[in-house]
Image (cartoon, grey):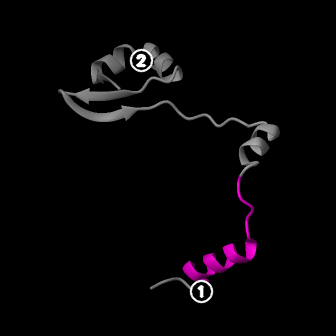
Amino acid sequence: MRQITQRELRNESGQIMRALEAGESFIVTRGGTPVGELLPLRRRGNARLATVLEIFRGAPRVNYRRLRKDLDAIADSDPRPRA
């Protein structure tokens, strides 16, 4: 992760924004001390159904009764707020 100063961020914001769009990350410093990070946003994409089905094709089947039993064992089903 590349370090940039506060001044660089101000003076080269256009170049830095393009680098962010390209996936680069930055640590912003002020007076030599790191004060923040600039990270590119993770963009969500839609996967093709065929791809998703292929990924999960070899996954074990879910036993819903066992799953429900396990969830009930660890989850508190009391709807009242905790004190």
Q: State the residue at coordinates (82%, 38%).
A: 50
Residue furthest to the right: 50
Report x, y in % for residue 15: 44, 13
Q: Which residues are magenta?
A: 59-78
Q: Which mark is residue 13?
A: 2
User: Which amino acid type is shown beneath numbered disc 1?
Assistant: Asp
Q: State the residue at coordinates (55%, 78%).
A: 74
Instruction: Quote the CA–CA distance across marks 2 and 1.
Output: 52 Å
Where, quadrant-wise, is the N terminus in this rendering? top left
User: Which amino acid type is shown beneath numbered disc 2?
Assistant: Ser
Q: State the residue at coordinates (73%, 50%).
A: 58
User: Residue 43 lies in magenta, yes or no?
Assistant: no
Q: Mark 2 packing: few (<14 Cα in 10 Å), some, or many (20+)?
A: few
Q: Nearer the viewer, residue 56 or 39?
A: 56
Q: Mark 1 packing: few (<14 Cα in 10 Å), some, or many (20+)?
A: few
Residue furthest to the left: 31
Q: State the residue at coordinates (75%, 62%).
A: 61
- Left or right for 43, reference 59: left
Q: Secondary structure at mark 1?
A: loop
Q: How many marks?
A: 2
Report x, y in % for residue 73: 58, 82
Instruction: Please tell me whether mark 2 or mark 1 is closer to you in this view.
Output: 1
- Reply above or below: 81 against 20: below
- Left or right for 75, reference 25: right
Q: Secondary structure at mark 2?
A: helix
Specify which label sits upstream in the sequence, 2 or 1. 2
Tag 2–tag 1 contact (CB < 8 Å): no
